[in-house]
Every structure is written in structure tokens, then in C-alpha cells.
Image (cartoon, rainbow, N blue to C red):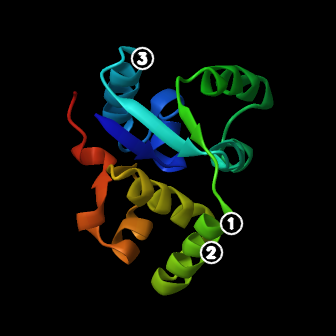
């Protein structure tokens, strides 16, 4: 099965041991490492994880270990064309979201696969029928 996972879901794979959907994140990460699922991400995902680590309650010495693990995730990186960027911008305006968040949604539509997210505010804005909430992820 193929998915696009946003930063709120990816964070749960490695760091979210005290977070709300940590168990589902760990299950999804396990499925990814075992080759049961494939996860695609836009290239900007690293900047979003960086912000989470920067503004989260993580010691600087621990962040380096997290980065090593994040950068070794077996993810498929996707780049956008100029037309794609216009489409992302149009959708972000339509739904009143950030450009970053909409890039994951757009990629999922482009690849015709589910977007997995734990960002409840984004899910409410775009519509839950379009997104698989991380809490609803079941092992592959």
C-alpha cells in the first residue's frame, strides 16, 4: 500500500513516544521498515520536522540522534513542477491552510493514494474523507 505522510505523522514514527498517536505511528513505521507500505513525501518534510524539533521540548543533544534516524527513513522523495506549485497554492487558498500542509495533500492526490495525518485542524479544514487520520491507521 502506498501513502503520503505529513510531518505530524512522521514525527510519531520516531519521537512521539509520549504523543497522542504514538502507537499508530510506531506501527506505521514498522510497516514501512518491513516493506509492507511505501511512503512518499514532498522534499520540504525535513523543514517541518526541523520546526517540530526546534519548538518542541527536545534537548539539542537528542535532536542530532533524531535527525540521523529521520534521514534514514526509507521514504520516496517527490519534487513538484511549476504547475504543481500553482495547484498547491490554489488549494491552500481554497481551504485556508498553509502552503506546507497543502503540499502533502496535493501530493497524495497526484499519486492517488491516502494522506496520513495527525493534524486535526488541517483534517477539519480539508475534510476527513480525504485524509486517513493517523489514529485510524491499522497495520498493513
Alpha-carbon distance for marks 1 and 3?
32 Å
Could you tell me residue 29's position as x and y percent? 40, 26
Mark earlier in primary sequence (1, 3): 3
Q: Are marks 1 and 2 in contact (CB under 8 Å)?
A: yes
Q: Residue at x 53, y 33 (%)?
A: 76
Could you tell me residue 5's position as x and y percent? 45, 45
Tag in front: 3 or 2 = 2
Relative to residue 20, is residue 48 drawn left or right? right
Q: Which numbered disc covers residue 86?
A: 2
Say which of 52 and 20 sits in front: 52
Q: Residue at x 66, y 26 (%)?
A: 71
The tally of labels here is 3
Say which of 85 and 96 sits in front: 85
Relative to residue 34, is residue 94 drawn left or right? right
How packed is label 2: few (under 14 Cα within 10 Å), some, or many (20 or more)? few
Relative to residue 36, is residue 85 drawn left or right? right
Say which of 120 and 101 sits in front: 101
On screen, residue 68 above or below 95: above
How packed is label 3: few (under 14 Cα within 10 Å), some, or many (20 or more)? some
Residue at label 3?
33
Q: For numbered disc 1, what is the local secondary structure?
A: helix
On screen, residue 107 above or below 32: below
Tag in front: 1 or 3 = 1
Residue at label 1?
82
Q: Which numbered disc covers residue 97?
A: none
Alpha-carbon distance for marks 3 and 2?
33 Å
Relative to residue 40, is residue 32 drawn left or right? left
Q: For numbered disc 2, what is the local secondary structure?
A: helix
Could you tell me residue 130's position as x and y percent? 29, 64
Amino acid at each position: 500500500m502506498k501513502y503520503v505522510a505529513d510531518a505530524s505523522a512522521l514525527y510519531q514514527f520516531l519521537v512521539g513516544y509520549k504523543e497522542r498517536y504514538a502507537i499508530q505511528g510506531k506501527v506505521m513505521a514498522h510497516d514501512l521498515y518491513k516493506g509492507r507500505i511505501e511512503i512518499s513525501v514532498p522534499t520540504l518534510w525535513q523543514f517541518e520536522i526541523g520546526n517540530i524539533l526546534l519548538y518542541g521540548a527536545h534537548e539539542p543533544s537528542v535532536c542530532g540522534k533524531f535527525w540521523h534516524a529521520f534521514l534514514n527513513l526509507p521514504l520516496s522523495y517527490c519534487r513538484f513542477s511549476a504547475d504543481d506549485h500553482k495547484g498547491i497554492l490554489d488549494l491552500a487558498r481554497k481551504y485556508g491552510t498553509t502552503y506546507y500542509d497543502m503540499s502533502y495533500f496535493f501530493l497524495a492526490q497526484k499519486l492517488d493514494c491516502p494522506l496520513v495525518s495527525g493534524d486535526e485542524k488541517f483534517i477539519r479544514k480539508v475534510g476527513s474523507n480525504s485524509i486517513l487520520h493517523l489514529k485510524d491507521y491499522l497495520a498493513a
